[in-house]
Image (cartoon, grey):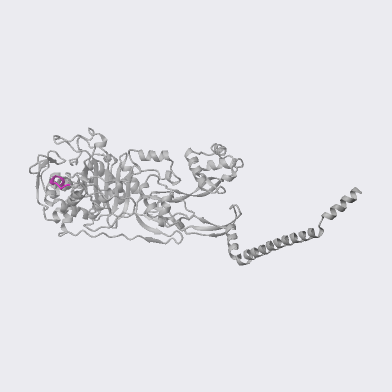
């Protein structure tokens, strides 16, 4: 009775109808939610599959197919005879894919037992790893030797994630020779990327840094190509679908004669200095030497900080292009142009004579302005003044001209402003004027300064390129062309060659054109007269040379010094610079040369033999001048009756 009573009591409390209604209501709500979800899903599917089909289809293809830029082959650089100055050579590159390496430090230690790996290589590699996706190979070493490649191939199964690939590397067959002309390439910096069109450098990681490599970067670079690859969801390439060829860079033919360049470098010997040779008929630069040079290969793949610091701190400054950036007092090399200015402005005549007693003083002053020959030259006319390089004659000429007319005449020969040579970083030098001193130094101009400028000293500074251009303009009797090193441009595919036309300069017109011949005759006497300061290089020459020696004073003499110290008595860093300019043949000029030998002493003894060897090589095809004449010191007793200029 108790159990039956309890069951009846529960049935009395349970509302079956209410529970059924609650269940049906909840089921309906759940069904409605499911229907709403299905409708939303259908709407979204319609949107994705129909309305936005084109958009997502393109996005899918972009994820599956990628356009990878392909670097073009950089153009080659040749000299005027076809000698290769810059080329691309096959190179083996050791690459590591970071995501496939478990212990990078251990891998690097093991690899160093197979190939040579420096600390600089490791540092450069780690920097590249931080900037590169982990699934891409990162170069560790470039330009592996065949022996290193062979050693790696034997043990390649031990190095997971390591691969040796073949590519192209920039190479300079002549090494340090002509490095200042050709220049080199190096990695593109962020600052450089901001200055160039990034689209033109897709796939390219190097750019011209100095020299021709920089000046004609746009021609040498070429046009990048591209390849379309299929990649998986992680971006790893699976297959190459299409290849679009780019266009290689143009080949450049320079006016440089590699044989003359090498002769000039060898003739300088251990001296620091510069040699510039120009064809006066068209402005083509035959040789442009700056010594010491440097090995451009060190910069191609990135020079390490230690080696770069050593180059920067080298007291001989091998990275400094003396031919374009070196500014020196021209010394007596300006005297032919000064003589022309004197004749042009009518302040002197070829027959006018001055008496040289070894020094002069200005009225009201006790300061002595000495001639290089302390005992004096006696009576000298214009021709003798040039031939014997009499300072007193040109002191007097400078006073007669005045600084304003001197400035007008000498800047017309190209001094005091860049020549426009198609290489970077050319300096302008300085040919002073009254206005310049007032503007820059806020001082008046003094007569004594006019005397110093008249013999190429004082504030005057020139570059070797400017001296060569001045010489070429005298050789061409006022005509001239802008100096340039680019001679022709070649299409590497069609092999068609386009010659670069010379750019003429404004002609220097004289009232009396016979004055050119008078001054050039005096320059010929410099090399071919026994009394000439360069007779040692002209007496046996098979062609006529028009020349002028020069010596640029580095340290001034005391006023009480009557005799200049000898070269051996002077510390090297205080010795004078030796200068020389010349052109040949004098009656049909084909080459104009300017030489500066730093701290070498006398121009007639140290610089003129260098120029003679350069002219021999270019005009005769061989050096006939005796190497014994290339001495860098002045003998105590000259072996010939010529005068050796201070």
In the image, what residue occupies the spot 7% across and 42% down? Answer: 364
Question: Viewer-proximal residue, 170 or 50?
Answer: 50
Where is residue 61 drawn, in percent x and y? 59, 60
Measured along the vertical axis of the image, is residue 468 above or below residue 559?
below
Give x and y (percent) for residue 250. 42, 57
Q: Is residue 101 visible?
A: yes
| Residue in the foreground of this view, choosing between 114 and 459 | 459
- In the image, the segment drawn in magenta is 443-449
Q: Looking at the picture, how far across and down is residue 4, in whole percent?
A: 90, 51
In the rendered view, does 591 fall on the left or right side of 491? left
Residue 190 x %, y %: 43, 50
Q: Which residue lies most toward the left here?
A: 364
Residue 24 vs residue 611: left or right? Answer: right
* Residue 240 in view, yes or no: no
For this orientation, the residue located farthest to the bottom is 51
Q: Quadrant of the C terminus?
A: top left
Report the number of numbered marks: 0
- The picture quadrant where one finds residue 501 is bottom left
- State whether residue 631 is above or below residue 402: above
Name the side, left or right, on which 435 lies relative to 72.
left
Which residue lies at the image location 27% right of the left edge and 60% below the top edge?
A: 504
Of all residues shown, which one is farthest toward the top?
A: 569
The residue drawn where x is 11% and y is 51% is 400
Please check the rendered image and state whether residue 105 is part of the magenta-colored stretch, yes or no. Answer: no
């Amino acid at each position: 009775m108790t159990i039956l009573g309890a069951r009846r009591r529960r049935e009395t409390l349970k509302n079956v109808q209410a529970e059924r209604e609650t269940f049906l209501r909840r089921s309906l709500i759940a069904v409605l939610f499911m229907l709403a979800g299905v409708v939303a899903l259908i709407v979204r599917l319609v949107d994705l599959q129909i309305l936005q089909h084109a958009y997502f289809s393109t996005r899918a293809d972009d994820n599956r197919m990628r356009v990878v830029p392909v670097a073009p082959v950089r153009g080659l650089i040749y000299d005027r005879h076809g000698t290769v100055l810059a080329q691309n050579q096959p190179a083996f590159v050791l690459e590591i894919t970071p995501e496939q390496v478990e212990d990078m430090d251990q891998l690097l230690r093991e690899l160093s037992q197979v190939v040579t790996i420096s600390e600089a290589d490791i540092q450069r590699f780690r920097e590249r790893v931080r900037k590169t996706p982990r699934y891409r190979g990162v170069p560790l070493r470039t330009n592996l030797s065949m022996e290193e490649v062979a050693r790696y191939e034997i043990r390649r199964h031990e190095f997971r994630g390591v691969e040796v690939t073949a590519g192209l590397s920039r190479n300079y067959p002549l090494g340090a020779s002509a490095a200042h002309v050709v220049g080199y390439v190096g990695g593109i910096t962020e600052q450089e990327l901001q200055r160039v069109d990034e689209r033109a450098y897709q796939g390219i990681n190097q750019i011209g840094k100095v020299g021709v490599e920089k000046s004609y970067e746009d021609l040498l670079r070429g046009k990048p190509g591209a390849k379309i690859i299929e990649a998986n969801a992680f971006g790893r390439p699976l297959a190459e679908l299409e290849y679009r060829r780019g266009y290689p860079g143009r080949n450049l033919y320079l006016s440089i004669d590699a044989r003359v360049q090498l002769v000039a470098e060898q003739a300088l010997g251990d001296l620091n200095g510069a040699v510039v040779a120009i064809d006066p008929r068209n402005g083509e630069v035959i040789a442009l030497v700056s010594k010491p040079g440097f090995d451009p290969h060190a910069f191609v793949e990135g020079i390490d900080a230690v080696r770069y610091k050593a180059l920067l701190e080298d007291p001989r400054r091998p990275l400094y292009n003396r031919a374009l950036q070196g500014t020196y007092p021209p010394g007596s090399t300006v005297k032919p142009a000064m003589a022309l200015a004197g004749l042009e402005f009518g302040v002197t005549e070829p027959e006018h004579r001055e008496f040289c007693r070894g020094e002069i003083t200005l009225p009201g002053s006790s300061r002595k302005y000495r001639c290089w020959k302390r005992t004096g030259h006696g009576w000298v006319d214009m021709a003798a003044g040039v031939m014997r390089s009499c300072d007193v004659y040109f002191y007097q000429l400078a006073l007669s001209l005045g600084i304003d007319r001197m400035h007008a005449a000498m800047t017309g020969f190209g001094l005091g402003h860049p020549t426009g040579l198609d290489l970077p970083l050319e300096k302008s030098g300085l040919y002073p004027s009254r206005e310049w001193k007032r503007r820059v130094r806020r001082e008046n101009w003094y007569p004594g300064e006019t005397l110093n400028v008249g013999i190429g000293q004082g504030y005057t500074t020139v570059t070797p390129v400017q001296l060569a251009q001045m010489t070429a303009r005298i050789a061409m009797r006022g005509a001239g062309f802008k100096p340039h090193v680019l001679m022709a441009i070649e299409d590497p595919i069609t092999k068609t060659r386009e010659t670069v036309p010379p750019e003429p300069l404004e002609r220097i017109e004289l009232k009396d054109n016979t004055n050119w011949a008078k001054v050039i005759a005096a320059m010929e006497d410099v090399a071919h007269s026994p009394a000439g300061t360069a007779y040692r290089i002209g007496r046996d020459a098979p062609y006529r040379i028009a020349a002028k020696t020069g010596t640029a004073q580095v340290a001034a003499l005391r006023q009480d010094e009557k005799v200049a110290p000898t070269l051996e008595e002077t510390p090297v860093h205080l010795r004078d610079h030796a200068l020389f300019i010349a052109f040949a043949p004098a009656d049909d000029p084909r080459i104009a040369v300017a030489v500066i030998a730093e701290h070498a002493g006398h121009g007639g003894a140290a610089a003129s033999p260098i120029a003679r060897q350069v002219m021999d090589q270019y005009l005769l095809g061989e050096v006939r001048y005796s190497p014994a004449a290339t001495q860098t010191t002045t003998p105590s007793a000259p072996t010939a009756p010529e005068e050796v200029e201070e």
